[in-house]
Image (cartoon, rainbow, N blue to C red):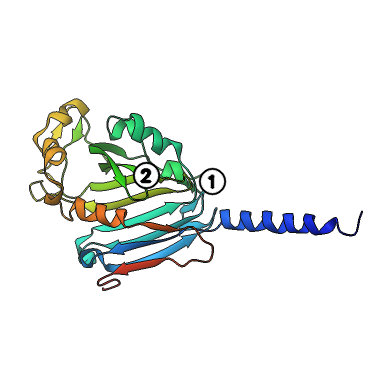
Amino acid sequence: MHRYTALPILLSTLLTTSVLCAANSPPNFTVIVPGPFGTSVSIKHYRKGQLIFDSPPFKISTLFPMTEYHGWSGPRSADQPWKVSVYATFDPKVVAAYEKARDGFEADLDEGQEFLQFAEGFRFAEPFKTFARFKRKQFRWGDAVSFLRSSYQDMPDRGVYVPDKSHLRYEVWGVTRDQQYTVVASVSVSHPKLADWGPKVREVEDIQALKRDRDYRLIEECPPDQFKPSLSAFDRIVDSLEIQHTSGGENEVKSEEAGRN
């Protein structure tokens, strides 16, 4: 081998290694968190395959590098957590939902199925899910869909539950314009006119009856600021997301009162 041949090979190897390391690194991004959402805000970074939850028999790891911001709206006792996660992968299913889906049922987006891996041999009981308020949205970083999800581990013997105050989660799913990242954000919400979870929660016979129900129509059609917390306020957090494409950047929470307990 010529004595100078090794130099471009070495440079090529170093460049390839650098690109692979960057591809396996959790994303760096910033968000602006207003005071009402600023309770106990935390940031966690995960590499591909790293455990994000480890409490036997539950062991859950991420299939892709991911960074997650997590906090609460109001006091933690209100049990209204929120999170904004960015996965270092492009999910075509999110694009398909944006382009073709007519509702959350057709979008069929589930973070556990798309991005997480459960411990071998563990069988997770798939909850029954209902969806409402499906919308397409444009953020500064890319296009997204949003919807309300209700998940139940136990269902009535016949039919489905109408919406209640304890099971609503607002979700936003999108991909960045450079098609390098998928954003998944969610917050637990409630509406003052819904019943508390318990015997007073009504049942209807099927999904079509659910879509005609007065409580379903309420959350489908009411202004976004009637929810607690406001869907519009959470959208502003999601819209503030800015991904740092340069290596070595640090995640940052910009907040009026970030980290208060």
Secondary element at image label 1: loop
User: Which quarter of the image is occupied by the C terminus?
Assistant: bottom left
Amino acid on which the number 1 mark rests in the picture = Glu
Which residue has dot 2 on it?
174
Position of residue 171 relative to residue 130, above or below, is: below
- Locate residue 195 relative to residue 69 in the image: left or right: left
Which residue has dot 1 on it?
120
Q: Name the residue nearer the viewer: 152 or 4.
A: 4
* Residue 31 makes an appearance in the image: yes
Q: CA distance from mark 1 to mark 2?
A: 29 Å
Q: Residue at x 21, y 56 (%)?
A: 233
- Locate residue 204 relative to residue 56 in the image: left or right: left
Answer with mark 1 or mark 2, whichever residue precedes in sequence: 1
Position of residue 39 relative to residue 19, above or below, is: below
Position of residue 40 relative to residue 66, above or below, is: below
Amino acid on which the number 2 mark rests in the picture = Gly
Q: Position of residue 107 (x, y in %)?
A: 34, 34
Q: Residues within 10 Å of mark 2 (few under 14, many from 20)?
A: many
Q: Name the residue nearer the viewer: 205 or 18.
A: 18
